[in-house]
């Protein structure tokens, strides 16, 4: 089934999270959940985002944490980038987002429509 999704290089928004647990073999826990990313799964895949530089898959969220299936070791405190499955909801849940290029933050934008849903 073709999802007609953007390529990794076409995805402009990523969220930086931290690995907070490696207690269960084959899984790590990150400090971003449905309040960071939304609870919307990737269409046709049933996952909750993409970790572009590792063979890891976010498979479940609670409000504050994400549960990630891992095929390579994770380290507590490690930072990883996640491309969210639903960028609109991700942006809407934050007051401010940072922007940059080449791994360098260049500034921030206030999310002007935050809280404007009626």
Image (cartoon, helix red, strand yellow):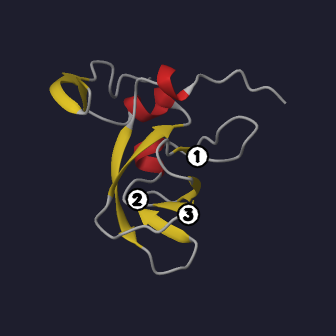
Position in image of residue 62 (x %, y %): 51, 60
* Quadrant assignment, res 75: bottom left
The reply, left or right, for residue 5 in relation to residue 105 is: right
Q: Is residue 81 left or right of residue 52?
A: left
Q: Is label 2 or label 3 in front?
A: 3
Looking at the rendered structure, the secondary structure element under dot 3 is strand
Provide the secondary structure element on which disc 2 rests.
loop
The vertical placement of 3 against 78, above or below, is above
User: Disc number at residue 35?
Assistant: none
Q: Which residue is mark 1?
A: 48
- Viewer-nearest residue: 75 or 18: 75
- The residue labelled by disc 2 is 64
| Mark pair 2, 1: CA separation | 14 Å
Q: Looking at the image, is mark 2 or mark 3 earlier in the sequence?
A: 2
- Quadrant showing the N terminus: top right
Q: From the viewer's perspective, is the residue at label 2 or at label 1 nearer? A: 1
The answer to whether the residue labelled 3 contacts the one labelled 1, judged by CB atoms less than 8 Å apart, is: no
Residue that extends furthest to the left in the rendered view of this protein: 107
Q: Earlier in the sequence, mark 3 or mark 1?
A: 1
Alpha carbons under labels 3 and 1: distance apart: 14 Å
Q: Secondary structure at mark 1?
A: loop
x, y percent for residue 16: 33, 45
**Residue that appears at 59% across and 22% down:** 6
- Report the residue marked by disc 3: 70
- Residue 79, given in percent of the width and then of the height, sits at 31, 54
Residue at 26% x, 27% y: name it: 102
Q: CA distance from mark 2 to mark 3?
A: 19 Å
Q: Are marks 2 and 3 in contact (CB under 8 Å)?
A: no
């Amino acid at each position: 089934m073709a999802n007609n999704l953007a390529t990794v290089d076409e995805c402009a928004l990523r969220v930086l999270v931290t690995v907070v647990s490696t207690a269960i073999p084959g899984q790590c826990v990150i400090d971003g959940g449905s309040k960071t990313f939304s609870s919307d799964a990737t269409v046709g895949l049933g996952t909750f985002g993409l970790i572009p530089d590792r063979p890891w898959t976010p498979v479940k969220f609670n409000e504050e944490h994400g549960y990630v299936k891992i095929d390579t070791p994770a380290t507590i405190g490690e930072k990883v980038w996640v491309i969210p499955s639903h960028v609109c909801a991700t942006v809407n849940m934050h007051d401010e987002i940072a922007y940059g290029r080449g791994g360098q933050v260049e500034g921030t934008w206030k999310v002007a429509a935050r809280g404007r849903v009626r």
